[in-house]
Amino acid sequence: MIKIQVITLFPEMFEGVLNSSMMWKAQKQQAVDFRLINLRDFGLGPRKQVDDTPYGGGDGMLLMIEPLTAAISDAKKHDPSAKVILTTPRGQRWKQLAAQNFANSKDGYIFICGRYEGVDERVMNLVDYYISVGDYVLTGGELPAMTIIDSIVRLIPGVLGGENSAAIESFSDGETLEFPQYTRPEVFKGLEVPKVLISGNHAEIAKWRAENSLKAE
């Protein structure tokens, strides 16, 4: 079982995602265990403060080092060997091969969901992986964390169901996009399914699929 913990100011954002579809199935199969940690629980003072203005001036607020460190320590109590992940534009671009490696690992993961203008730089001493989901900026790290978690969990053996489901999909080899696929009806408003796919000739079908797979740019 892979343990995945998420440190966030908005744990309610994850409820629907983690308790639906494949994420729900993975929990039911005991392939994954999710735990949501509200960063506000570790805030400072009576107002549970978690952010402050940056030294040196500038717009926006930063998540403070003290609440972040306390939340990570709490997560480590539940899974001491868990790897800490921070989603950030400075991180390495997330790819399917990385998702496969994470899914095959026995490690647990602790996701830090940033907010505002980012986090106190000193928290980087506690982070194992810096990951980016693209060259754009979002309001917070919750959506990137959901994306990464989904891409990992669906690849845990047995979660998808089909033996070859993950093996033939886009980027499974790191560079190839999946071939076009069709289902019934055979003809729809004049648009026909390629004849080779209904021929029953598996060698020709395999050849057609290979020829119609695309290389990702």
Image (cartoon, rainbow, N blue to C red):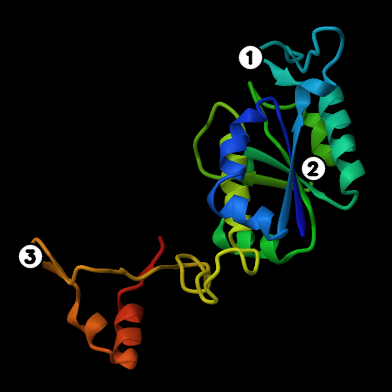
Q: Tell me the quarter of the image containing the N terminus.
A: bottom right
* Residue placed furthest toward the top: 46
For disc 1, the marked residue is: 60
Reading the chain from its start, which is encountered first: label 1 or label 3?
Answer: 1
What's the amino acid at mark 1?
A: Gly
Residue 64 in sight from this viewpoint = no
Task: Look at the numbered discs 1 and 3 and tell me whether their residues touch, using CB distance below 8 Å.
Answer: no
Front one among 21 and 202: 21
Identify the residue shown where x is 67% and y is 55%. Answer: 28
Q: Tell me the quarter of the image containing the C terminus.
A: bottom left
Establish if 37 lies above or below 91. above
Front one among 200 and 105: 200
What's the amino acid at mark 3?
A: Gly
Residue 3 is tagged as: none
How many neighbours does mark 3 have within 10 angstroms: few (below 14), some (14-19), or many (20 or more)? few
Q: Position of residue 83 (x, y in %)?
A: 80, 50
For disc 2, the marked residue is: 127
